[in-house]
Each structure stands twice: as structure tokens, then as C-alpha cells.
Image (cartoon, grey):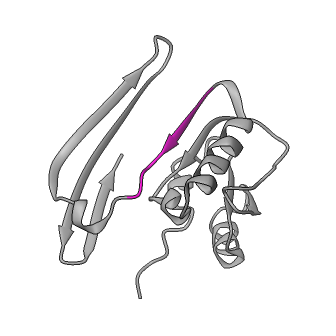
Amino acid sequence: MLPVATAEHLRFLSDYQTVGLDIDSAFIQLAKNKLPRSDFHIADMSHFQLGMKFDVILCLFSSIGYLLDDESIKSALSCFKSHLEPSGAIFIEPWIEPDAWLSRPADMISAEDGERKVCRVIRNQREGDRSFLDAH
């Protein structure tokens, strides 16, 4: 049995107030067990209202790929935007289809706006039908 990666990225953000959502209550319970100080909600990313704003919104591990039509994606983006502080940032990791997944050496992507700089270092591998990511 593989370890469940639910909420693992939030462990790296433990110095911050974090809120998570998932449509599956079992994953919410796993996340709550791992990070009892964080706030988790059962919700669909394309239709949610938390009544709060965030400095950063993360949609990682290709979660956006569970939205199967343009309207659902547009609705999710609208929900993200409505929950974002005016100077906030949204990071969405895209869905990558298996045939497009290539093994590559480590790569760094950075962006800045004069006040902030964000860097992401990632190395990926594909072995048959399995893909592996090492990201920082």
C-alpha cells in the first residue's frame, strides 16, 4: 500500500495559518489527523464559499484535472479569485496526460513582481505508467 500524500505539502507550511478543502470526507479526515491545527472543509473546488480571503491559494498535484469541463474550471477559477486578497497569488499545478509526461533533469522556474520572488525546483521521472515528482 502506498502512503497517502493528502495534506503533506501543508506540513511545510506549518508556520502559517492554513485552510484546505477536498470533496472527499475521507481525505479531509486524513488531513485533520495529520494536521489538527489546520482548518479543513468538505467542498467542491468549483463551488465553495469559505467566507474568508487568502494571501496564497494553492491547487497542487494536478487536482485541477478532476474538473472535466470548461465551465467547472471557470467556476473553480472564479471561486479562487473571490477568496484571494487583492495582492495575493494563485498557484495551479496543471494536469499532465501520461503521453505528455517526460523524464527530465532538475529544473528551476522563478517569477517576481518587484516585491516578491517565487522559485520552484522540480525533478520528474516516468517509469512505465508511474510518474515521480521531487519538488521544492
Residue 69 falls in image quadrant:
bottom right
Would residue 17 be seen by someone viewing this image from the given angle? no
Tell which residue pokes out farthest to the front in this image: 70
Q: Is residue 36 above or below residue 128?
A: above
Picture coordinates of residue 115, whole percent (x, y) = 50, 13
Can residue 29 be seen here? The reply is yes
Bounds of the magenta segment: 88-95
Asked if the stretch drawn in magenta spans residue 90, the answer is: yes
Can you say which quadrant of the picture contains the C terminus? top left
Say if 81 sits above or below 32 in the image: above
Q: Horizontal and vertical percent for residue 105?
A: 14, 49
* Residue positioned 24% across, 60% down in the render: 100
> In terms of depth relative to the viewer, which is nearer, 106 or 15?
106
Residue 81 % position (x, y): 67, 36
Q: Is residue 135 magenta?
A: no
- Looking at the image, which residue is at 53% across and 64% down? 68
Q: Outermost residue toward the bottom?
A: 1
Instruction: Answer left or right for 129 relative to 113.
Output: left
